[in-house]
Image (cartoon, helix red, strand yellow):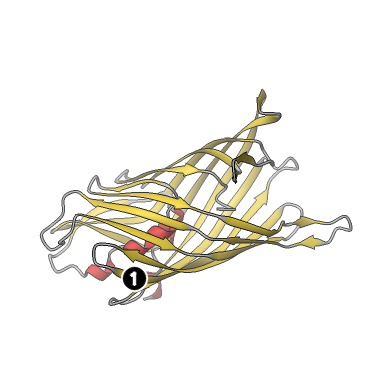
Amino acid sequence: MIFRSFKWLALVCLLPGALQAQQVPYEAEPEKQVHWAMAAFFGTGWYQVDENRSMYIFRIPPRQTVRRAGWDEDGNRKVGIEIQYPVALGLHRLDDIPDFIDFENYGTITFTPGVQVEVPINRRWSLRPYAHFGIGYENDTGEYARIWYGGVKSRYMLDDRNRWALLSGIYVAGYKPEFESRGRYGSVMAGFEFDHKLADLRLGDDPLYLNWHLTYNYLFDDLQFHIDEERVATIDDTWELGIALGKGQRKIKIWLFSFEHIGLAFKSSTNGDYKAITVNFRSPFTY
């Protein structure tokens, strides 16, 4: 039962997957569908399921670095601590809605503060456990929901120049609406990340780098979306390809904000029924 509900966090990472349309009876249980509270996990971008459901998410992710991870002059480990205050605004548009759904467009807002801790295991390998707790609101019904998510991310550098990295992670998430049963979801992720210096090109006074990552996310159970009265779209896993420009190990600073790099990420299910384009400001490891 826990694996059945443990299904959703993979979409959180939104790493690509397989959407399959299948026949279901009209009385399909609505609580098995993906809940609006899960918008808290999406980055800024556009998301679509089966050309029927679209989401437009604007995520504001203020963060405070209390201490940076690394090693001191004596070779002692320094554990990094980062406090995050993400706010996500969502517009959910439902294009072809069956009669049993009585709204077509609605907005959501979520606030899920949390702490991420980066632990250097050795000079190449780091772990990043994290936990977030917060609340969300949906304007059409006036419903509130408690939201939580967390997990452990891993990054292993494959060379001495910190260019190639092996990424992995395990995630769990959940929510408790005011008048409905709670839901919990989970996923595992694996992938690669690469930084490539672009010859003599520069960004300001610093060398320009091309950053890309490719990740695969497996969901412990299906995520279900009602398409019409007889069909449900099911997501089992997700893929993500991110491409961005940056300064390698240095941050890009714009006014009060700083970014690891600036680019886009493209997400898709295995059969192409699920699609997304998001803004790519950070590595999946530090997101």
151 in relation to 244, above or below = below
In the rendered image, which residue does mark 1 sit on? 144
**Name of the residue lying farthest toward the front:** 255
Q: Position of residue 50 (x, y in %)?
A: 25, 47
Quarter placement of the N terminus? bottom left
Q: How many marks?
A: 1
Q: Quadrant of residue 227?
A: bottom left
Near-viewer residue (48 or 250): 250
Q: Quadrant of residue 136?
A: bottom left
**Name of the residue lying farthest toward the top:** 200
Near-viewer residue (71 or 166): 71
Q: Position of residue 110 (x, y in %)?
A: 41, 62
**Name of the residue lying farthest toward the left:** 99
Left or right, 148 with respect to 50, comes to right
At a point 62% along the width and 39% down the height, the residue shown is 252
Q: Position of residue 79 (x, y in %)?
A: 73, 63
Crowd rating for badge 1 (residues with CA inside 10 Å; few <14, some 14–19, many 20+): some
Q: Position of residue 253 (x, y in %)?
A: 62, 40
Left or right, 64 with respect to 27, comes to right
**Name of the residue lying farthest toward the right:** 74
Q: Quadrant of residue 22?
A: bottom left
Q: Amino acid at mark 1?
A: Tyr
Secondary structure beneath dot 1 equals strand
167 in relation to 244, above or below = below
